[in-house]
C-alpha cells in the first residue's frame, strides 16, 4: 500500500493522490509512505523516484543496521522500530531530499500511522509548508523512539515487583528464570536502542545537517535515546544485583542444609561405631553375656547423642 501527501507551491495539501498521477514538479514537496508494498510498488523506488540502486537494495534486503548514507541530494536513513511483543527490531527506511520524503517498511506499524496522522493534522492546519520533509522525518523518528519507552517501563515494573517480592517467594529457580528472562528482554531492547543512538549522534553532528532548520528537534530525539540507554544499563545492573543476591541466598540455604546434615551425621557416627562393634561376629565377647547389656548399650547411645546435641546447641551450630 502506498499513501501520499503533497503540498503544492500555493501551500495547498493533497492526500491520497496516486504516484502515477502526480507530477513532482507541480508540488513544493511530497511524502510517499510505502507500507507492506507489493513488488510492483517497490519498483517505484527506482522507476518513479530514481533513488540510488544501493539504497533501494538495502530497502529490499532486511534487516540492516541503523545508518545514514548520502547520495547526491538524497539522504538515506535506516531506522529501527520495535515490535511490541517480541522486542525485535523492525526496519524502517527513509529517503529524504529537499523536495520529497519516502518512507518504506514491510510491516504495518502503529508508529507510522501516528506520524502520518500528526503530519496530516499539521498540514490541514496550514502550518506544514514551512516545515517540509525534514520535519516529517523528525516526526517519524520521534514516534519510533517514543515507542521504546513503554517496553522499557514494563520491564522496570517487573523488576520492581520482582525485587519487592523476591524474599517472599519459595522457589529460587523461578526467581532466577524471571531474572534471566528480563535480562534477555533488556538485551534485545539494547540492540535496538544503542545503534539508533549512534545514528542520531551522527545526524546531530553531521556537517550535512549542521545548518538544518530542525537540528534542535533531532537533538531532542538523541537526548531521549541517551536517557533510554542509561535506563537500560541501570536495569541491567539491577538484574545483575538480583542475580547475585539470589545466588548468595541459594548458597546460604545450601550451606544451612549441609550444616544440618553434617550435624546429624556427626551425632550418629559414635552410635554407628558402637553398633558396628557389637555387630562383629566374634564368639568371645564378654558384654554379650550381660543380662542388661542391651539396655546398657541403648542408654549409652542415647546419652552420647543427647550430649552431642546439647554441645552443638551451646555452640550455636543449629542457628
Image: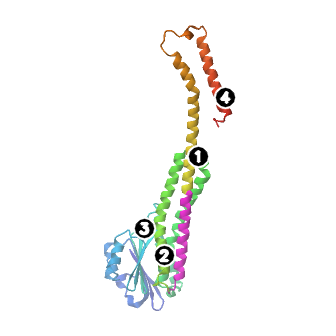
- Rounded to the nearest angstrom, the CA distance separating label 3 from label 2 is 17 Å
- Looking at the magenta stretch, what is its main secondary structure? helix
Given residues 87 and 20, the one toward you in this image is 87
Q: Nearer the viewer, mark 4 or mark 1?
A: 4
Neighbour class for label 1 at 10 Å: few (<14), some, many (≥20)?
few
- Magenta stretch: give its range: 211-238
Q: Nearer the viewer, mark 4 or mark 3?
A: 4
- Rounded to the nearest angstrom, the CA distance separating label 4 from label 2 is 71 Å
- Marking on residue 310: 4
Q: Which residue is mark 3?
A: 90
Name which of mark 1 and mark 3 comes first in the sequence.
3
| Element marked by disc 2 | helix
- Marking on residue 169: 1
Residue 136 position in % (x across, y down): 48, 80
Residue 66 position in % (x across, y down): 43, 72
- Rounded to the nearest angstrom, the CA distance separating label 2 from label 1 is 43 Å
Marks 4 and 1 in Cβ contact (< 8 Å): no
Q: Which residue is mark 2?
A: 200
Q: Give the residue displayed 57% in from the left and 29% down from the top.
A: 266
Q: Which residue is situated farthest in the right direction here?
A: 314
> Looking at the image, how many numbered discs can be counted on the residues?
4
Amino acid at each position: 500500500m502506498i499513501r501520499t501527501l503533497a503540498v503544492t507551491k500555493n501551500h495547498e495539501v493533497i492526500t491520497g493522490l496516486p504516484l502515477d498521477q502526480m507530477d513532482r514538479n507541480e508540488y513544493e514537496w511530497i511524502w510517499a509512505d510505502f507500507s507492506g508494498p507489493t513488488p510492483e510498488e517497490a519498483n517505484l523506488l527506482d522507476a518513479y523516484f530514481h533513488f540510488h540502486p544501493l539504497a533501494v537494495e538495502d530497502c529490499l534486503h532486511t534487516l540492516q543496521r541503523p545508518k545514514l548514507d548520502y547520495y547526491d541530494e538524497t539522504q538515506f536513513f535506516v531506522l529501527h522500530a520495535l515490535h511490541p511483543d517480541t522486542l525485535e527490531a523492525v526496519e524502517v527506511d527513509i529517503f529524504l531530499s529537499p523536495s520529497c520524503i519516502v518512507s518504506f517498511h514491510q510491516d504495518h506499524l502503529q508508529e507510522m500511522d501516528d506520524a502520518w496522522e500528526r503530519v496530516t493534522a499539521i498540514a490541514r492546519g496550514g502550518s506544514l509548508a514551512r516545515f517540509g520533509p525534514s520535519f516529517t522525518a523528525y516526526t517519524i523518528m520521534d514516534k519510533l523512539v517514543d515507542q521504546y519507552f513503554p517496553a522499557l517501563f514494563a520491564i522496570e515494573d517487573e523488576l520492581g515487583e520482582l525485587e519487592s517480592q523476591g524474599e517472599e517467594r519459595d522457589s529460587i529457580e523461578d526467581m532466577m528464570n524471571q531474572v534471566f528472562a528480563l535480562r534477555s528482554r533488556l538485551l534485545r531492547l539494547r540492540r535496538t536502542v544503542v545503534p539508533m543512538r549512534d545514528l542520531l549522534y551522527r545526524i546531530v553532528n553531521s556537517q550535512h545537517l549542521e545548518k538544518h532548520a530542525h537540528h534542535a528537534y533531532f537533538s531532542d530525539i538523541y537526548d531521549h535515546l541517551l536517557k533510554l540507554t542509561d535506563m537500560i544499563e541501570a536495569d541491567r545492573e539491577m538484574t545483575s544485583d538480583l542475580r547475585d543476591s539470589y545466588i548468595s541466598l541459594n548458597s546460604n540455604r545450601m550451606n544451612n542444609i549441609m550444616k544440618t546434615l553434617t550435624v546429624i551425621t556427626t551425632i550418629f557416627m559414635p552410635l554407628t561405631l558402637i553398633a558396628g562393634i557389637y555387630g562383629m561376629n566374634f564368639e568371645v565377647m564378654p558384654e554379650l553375656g550381660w543380662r542388661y547389656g542391651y539396655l546398657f548399650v541403648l542408654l549409652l547411645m542415647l546419652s552420647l547423642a543427647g550430649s552431642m546435641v546439647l554441645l552443638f546447641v551451646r555452640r550455636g551450630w543449629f542457628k
